[in-house]
């Protein structure tokens, strides 16, 4: 069984492939500041998308997307403000997506994408 960091990195690679196949353009991955980390920042047409990726091996503690709690949502809003302050990106729409990746042995991963999961 791979360590949690390997699982998370694998989930992010799967999420990037899924999102780019869906037409999004990834601008940044694993952007960090002292308040935390943004998994993915992407463009979806005119929209700027801050995307949280949650990867799990099973659903014993709920589906992966359920791990983005109100506390995590607040932190992601702060991180998005920090990212915007440091980058020259402008968009008429900013949204927060969540991608859940369920990694299963010997079977393809199951990806759940929730566009505009919270505001």
Image: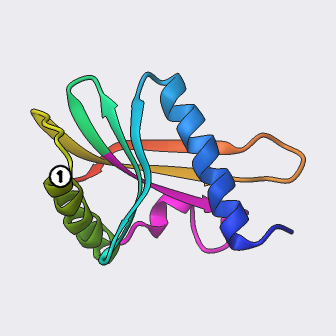
Q: Which residues are magenta?
A: 50-69
Quadrant position of residue 68: bottom left
Q: Give the residue displayed 54% in from the left and 39% down from the top.
A: 16
Judge from the rendering whether residue 87 lies leftward or rightward of residue 57; answer left or right: left
Judge from the rendering whether residue 108 lies leftward or rightward of residue 47; answer left or right: right
Q: Give the residue displayed 90% in from the left and 47% down from the top.
A: 106
Q: Give the residue displayed 72% in from the left and 63% down from the top.
A: 6
From the image, tell me which residue sits under label 1.
84
Up the image or down, 98 lies above or below 72; here it is above
Q: Quadrant of the C terminus?
A: bottom left
Up the image or down, 99 lies above or below 18; here it is below
**Would residue 60 be counted in the magenta stretch?**
yes
Q: Give the residue displayed 20% in from the left and 68% down from the top.
A: 78
Quadrant position of residue 94: top left
Circle 1 SS class = helix
Whether residue 89 can be seen here: yes
Quadrant position of residue 91: top left
- In the rendered image, residue 25, in percent from the top left (x then y), is placed at 40, 29
Judge from the rendering whether residue 100 lies leftward or rightward of residue 107; answer left or right: left
Whether residue 56 can be seen here: no
Q: Nearer the viewer, residue 35 or 108?
A: 35
């Amino acid at each position: 069984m791979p360590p949690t960091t390997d699982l998370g990195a694998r989930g992010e690679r799967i999420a990037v492939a899924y999102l780019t196949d869906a037409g999004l353009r990834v601008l940044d991955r694993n952007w960090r500041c002292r308040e935390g980390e943004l998994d993915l920042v992407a463009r979806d047409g005119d929209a700027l998308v801050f995307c949280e990726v949650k990867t799990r091996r099973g659903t014993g503690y709920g589906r992966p997307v359920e791990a983005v709690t109100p506390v995590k949502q607040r932190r992601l809003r702060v991180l998005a403000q920090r990212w915007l302050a440091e980058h020259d990106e402008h968009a008429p729409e900013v949204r927060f997506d969540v991608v859940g990746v369920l990694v299963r042995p010997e079977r393809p991963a199951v990806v759940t994408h929730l566009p505009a999961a919270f505001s």
